[in-house]
Image: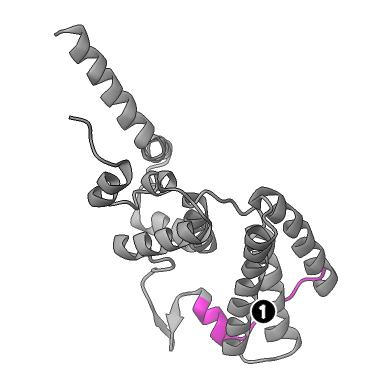
Amino acid sequence: MTPEKTTALQKVNLGILRKYAVVLVLLLLVLLFSLVNPQFFSARNFSNIVTQNTYFIIVAIGLAFVLISGGIDLSVGYQMSLVGIIMAMMMTKWALPVWLALVAGLALGTFLGLINGLIVTRIRTFPLIVTLATSVVFQGVSYIVSKAGTYRNYPQSFQDITKHRVQSRHVPELPAVVPGHHKAAVAGRASGRLSGDSDHHHRLGGLLSDQDRDASSGPRRQ
């Protein structure tokens, strides 16, 4: 084998390793835990893991678009905290309907995200600084509103939702549905254009088709 071919194979191997490093680490962890405890690699355990981390999965899907477009949001955790507190107060303290609390939570989460977006795009401040500052604000508002208290005794209809039950019937665990590649590409391109992002971030997220790559790279040299 010639030195040129050896170098090319090494580059290919390193490229594959960099591309799938996270997946390989995840598979190694699953294998390790399965050897330590045979019950780990079971459908019931995986179902419990997904169910217990549903909110992380949902937030990660939304945050993925932000990261792909070259941004970052450090305030999502405290946004979840504030939204959760308001929803809990509406259902337990103010005895409002569950559907109204859910709608209010979605609206509040959208509003908090809009605040970050407007500051970043209108004032032209780095997302890292903006979201770090707003995370402190959201945390303070959460403490003020809740008075550092806890809320229990949620309505049964809300508990049914958390247990994946609809009209007393158990629904298979589908807590977070990843959007299709076409929808993800449309949303990713739109977010990148709104933030003035370049095509480089779209390539990182796999959001550029072959035709887009050819068009963005310009005419090839003969």
- Could you tell me residue 144's position as x and y percent? 85, 70
Which quadrant of the figure contains the C terminus? top left
For image coordinates 43% across by 63% down, the residue present is: 190
Q: Is residue 150 left or right of residue 197?
A: right
Name the foreground residue: 169 vs 73.
Answer: 73
Q: Residues within 10 Å of mark 1 (few under 14, many from 20)?
A: many
Describe the element under mark 1 as helix, strand or loop: helix
Range shown magenta: 147-161
Q: Is residue 13 above or below residue 133?
A: above
Which quadrant of the figure contains the N terminus? top left
For image coordinates 56% across by 82% down, the residue present is: 158
- Could you tell me residue 153's position as x and y percent? 68, 81
- Could you tell me residue 33's position as x and y percent? 43, 39
For image coordinates 30% across by 31% down, the residue present is: 16
Q: Is residue 71 above or below residue 161?
A: above
Q: Main secondary structure of the magenta part?
A: loop
Name the foreground residue: 82 vs 47.
Answer: 82
Query: In this orientation, does residue 193 appear?
Result: yes
